[in-house]
Image (tube, rainbow, N blue to C red):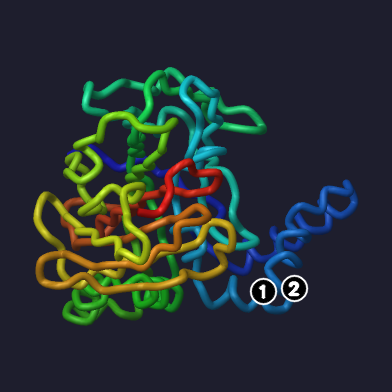
Amino acid sequence: MQKTPKYSTSFFVVSAGALRSWFSLLRRATLLANLELVTRVRRFGLNLATVCVALLSAGGAGAHDFWLQPRSFNPAVAQPDPITIEVGHGPFRSRWSGALDRVVLFSSLTSGGRVDLKGALRPTPEQDATLSFPAPGTQMLLFESTAALSNLPSIRYNDYAKVEGLTPALAYRAKVGQTAANGRESYSRRCKALINVGAGGKPNPWVTKPVGFTLEIVPAVDPYELGAGQLLPVQVLYRGAPLRGALVKLTNLEFDVRPVSTHLTDSAGRASFQVPRTGDWLLNVIWTRPIKGNADADFETTFSSLTFGYSGSRVTAR
């Protein structure tokens, strides 16, 4: 059996050592006059004590938000649009630090077919890729990462599983008497981003269809076609089937300390959200299942997100 590579991120596991490293980083940032993190903490109305408590209690849940972020979700035709891969939220939001060999898939999908964009991934301090689109309409970007490993102390893993609604993990750990054991998982990520290019254009049929991800959020309508006051219905699919009881979160990416709303999917895997037609938006969901045969992990966890936005949109409410 192929062994899962041992990758991790400093945001995923929060320990006393990580907290000391955080303080050290803050001190170095101050000495270097690089106050970006301090600015973010103040911007979101948090103080240092609040941040430390959040770190200790959340276990690493802050790194579970993961998405594709274009500079503009509404670029003009042929306009260069820088893209970043983002992780975390609130004052701990940052660029993904994964190596390019961890990218399984980065492509666009339209009515004309799929285009491989992995060659466009050239990370710089400002962006991970710069794309432009030759035709108007809704463009869909897809991203998938390889698996990495996480090993959290029991109290933090249990808290993370409760916060994210990972009932399969909680139930299995209780059944086999592992509630007090470390939580070990192999995790990977899937992202979809919808970019509204230009004005007019043909509808993109893939927006409302599954693309075959292990876990994905499928909107029932194109978010750019929503009428004024209309709910956005979505369906969550896991391994090709509707997923019941998954916690789906809607977050305003311009103020992403906490979700705007959350819903559990029904028996058909469906949930509906009221999305204001302004700002940039993230829908995300996480699911897991117990696995056997992996010496380093007891669960296989998948993170999935869908992003879209109306900042500078040329779409008008119908």
Separation of residues labelled 1 and 2 (CA atoms): 6 Å
Query: Residue 47: image x %, image y %?
Result: 74, 75
Give the class, few, some or many, for how many residues have Cα within 10 Å of label 2's Cα (few <14, many ≥20). Answer: few
Name the element at disc 1: helix
Quarter of image, res 124: top right
Residue 241 lies left or right of residue 218; in this view the side is left
Q: Which mark is residue 48?
A: 2
Front residue of 272 and 65: 272
Can residue 187 be seen? no
Q: Is residue 163 above or below residue 240?
A: below
Q: Where does the C terminus fall, quadrant-wise? A: bottom left
Q: Secondary structure at mark 2?
A: helix
- Residue 254 position, x and y percent, is 58, 57
Q: Nearer the viewer, residue 142 or 18?
A: 142
Left or right of 34 on screen, residue 16: left
Q: Position of residue 134 (x, y in %)?
A: 40, 18
Q: Position of residue 294 (x, y in %)?
A: 23, 51
Amino acid type, residue under disc 1 in the picture: Cys
Question: In the rendered view, would you say 224 is above or below 269?
Answer: above
Crowding at label 1, few (<14), some or many (≥20) Cα neighbours within 10 Å? some
Is label 1 in contact with label 2 (beta carbons under 8 Å)?
A: yes
Name the quarter where the N terminus is drawn. top left
Find disc 1 in the rendering and name its residue: 52
Q: Residue at x 51, y 38 (%)?
A: 70
Q: Residue at x 40, y 44 (%)?
A: 6
What residue is drawn where x is 66% and y is 66%? Answer: 19
Query: In the rendered view, does 149 fall on the left or right side of 300?
Result: right
* Nearer to the camera, 243 or 280: 280
User: Mark 2: which amino acid?
Assistant: Leu
Is residue 93 depicted above or below 42 in this figure?
Answer: above
Q: Is residue 152 visible?
A: yes
The answer to which of 283 and 174 lies nearer the viewer is 283
